[in-house]
Image (tube, helix red, strand yellow):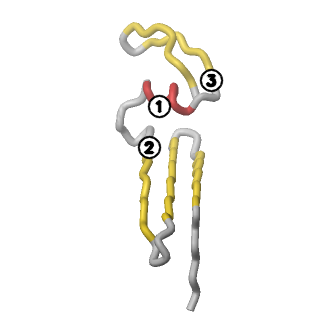
Amino acid sequence: LRIDVTTDGRHAEVEFTTDWQKDAERRDLTINSMFLAFEICHVCQDGSLLKVTMHIKLLTAWKELSIKCELTNVLLLLG
Protein backbone atom coordinates (compact mmCIF):
# COMPACT_ATOMS: atom_id res chain seq x y z
CA LEU A 1 0.00 0.00 0.00
CA ARG A 2 1.39 3.36 -0.97
CA ILE A 3 0.65 7.05 -1.47
CA ASP A 4 1.97 9.10 -4.40
CA VAL A 5 3.59 12.21 -2.90
CA THR A 6 4.54 13.80 -6.25
CA THR A 7 4.10 12.54 -9.79
CA ASP A 8 5.84 13.48 -13.02
CA GLY A 9 4.34 11.44 -15.82
CA ARG A 10 5.29 7.83 -15.17
CA HIS A 11 7.64 8.63 -12.28
CA ALA A 12 6.33 9.12 -8.77
CA GLU A 13 7.78 9.84 -5.37
CA VAL A 14 5.98 7.46 -3.01
CA GLU A 15 5.45 6.84 0.67
CA PHE A 16 4.21 3.57 2.10
CA THR A 17 1.05 3.36 4.20
CA THR A 18 -1.28 0.92 5.91
CA ASP A 19 -4.39 2.89 4.85
CA TRP A 20 -6.40 0.96 2.23
CA GLN A 21 -8.56 4.01 1.43
CA LYS A 22 -5.60 6.25 0.55
CA ASP A 23 -4.10 3.50 -1.60
CA ALA A 24 -7.43 2.99 -3.40
CA GLU A 25 -7.79 6.70 -4.19
CA ARG A 26 -4.64 6.70 -6.35
CA ARG A 27 -5.60 3.62 -8.40
CA ASP A 28 -7.63 3.32 -11.57
CA LEU A 29 -9.92 0.40 -12.42
CA THR A 30 -7.41 -1.85 -14.15
CA ILE A 31 -6.51 -5.47 -13.53
CA ASN A 32 -4.08 -4.10 -10.92
CA SER A 33 -6.91 -3.29 -8.52
CA MET A 34 -10.49 -4.27 -7.78
CA PHE A 35 -12.61 -2.93 -4.94
CA LEU A 36 -16.14 -4.02 -4.09
CA ALA A 37 -18.41 -2.80 -1.32
CA PHE A 38 -22.07 -3.53 -0.83
CA GLU A 39 -24.74 -3.51 1.86
CA ILE A 40 -27.83 -5.69 2.09
CA CYS A 41 -30.76 -4.97 4.41
CA HIS A 42 -33.58 -7.48 4.85
CA VAL A 43 -36.59 -7.48 7.18
CA CYS A 44 -37.09 -10.92 8.73
CA GLN A 45 -40.51 -12.49 9.36
CA ASP A 46 -40.41 -11.51 13.04
CA GLY A 47 -39.78 -7.86 12.13
CA SER A 48 -36.11 -7.83 13.08
CA LEU A 49 -33.62 -6.36 10.66
CA LEU A 50 -30.86 -8.41 9.08
CA LYS A 51 -28.05 -6.11 7.97
CA VAL A 52 -25.03 -7.46 6.13
CA THR A 53 -22.17 -5.17 5.18
CA MET A 54 -19.28 -6.63 3.22
CA HIS A 55 -16.13 -4.95 1.95
CA ILE A 56 -13.81 -6.87 -0.36
CA LYS A 57 -10.48 -5.43 -1.43
CA LEU A 58 -8.40 -7.49 -3.82
CA LEU A 59 -5.00 -6.26 -4.95
CA THR A 60 -3.74 -8.73 -7.50
CA ALA A 61 -0.26 -7.24 -7.43
CA TRP A 62 0.18 -8.60 -3.90
CA LYS A 63 -2.39 -11.39 -4.19
CA GLU A 64 -3.97 -10.26 -0.93
CA LEU A 65 -7.64 -10.57 -0.07
CA SER A 66 -9.21 -8.72 2.80
CA ILE A 67 -12.83 -9.46 3.66
CA LYS A 68 -14.80 -7.76 6.41
CA CYS A 69 -18.32 -8.90 7.24
CA GLU A 70 -20.57 -7.24 9.81
CA LEU A 71 -23.78 -9.00 10.89
CA THR A 72 -26.28 -7.17 13.08
CA ASN A 73 -29.50 -8.64 14.60
CA VAL A 74 -29.21 -11.96 12.78
CA LEU A 75 -31.95 -14.54 13.26
CA LEU A 76 -31.13 -17.83 11.56
CA LEU A 77 -33.89 -20.44 11.37
CA LEU A 78 -33.01 -23.94 10.22
CA GLY A 79 -35.89 -26.20 9.51
Marks 2/1: CA–CA distance: 8 Å
Mark 1: which amino acid? Ala
Chain-order first, disc 1 or disc 3: 3
Secondary structure under the numbered disc 3 in the rendered image: loop
- Residue toward you, 1 or 12: 1
Q: How many marks?
A: 3
Mark 1 vs 3: CB contact within 8 A: no
Q: Quadrant of the N terminus?
A: top right
For image coordinates 39% across by 42% down, the residue present is: 31
Provide residue 13's location: percent of width, then percent of height. 52, 10
Front-most of 73 and 22? 73
Quarter of the image with the C terminus is: bottom right
Instruction: Identify residue type, mark 3.
Output: Thr
Residue that mark 1 sits on:
24
Which amino acid type is shown beneath numbered disc 2? Phe
Q: Residues within 10 Å of mark 1 (few under 14, many from 20)?
A: some
- Residue at position x 58%, y 55% in the image: 69
Question: Residue 17: which disc?
Answer: 3
Q: Relative to residue 20, is residue 48 depicted above or below?
A: below
Q: CA distance from mark 1 to mark 3?
A: 11 Å
- Asked whether the residues under the numbered discs 2 and 1 touch, taking CB atoms below 8 Å apart as contact, a structural biologist would say yes
Q: Position of residue 55 (x, y in %)?
A: 51, 48
Secondary structure at badge 2 equals strand
Question: Residue at the location (51% across, 25% down)?
Answer: 22
Label 2 sits on residue: 35
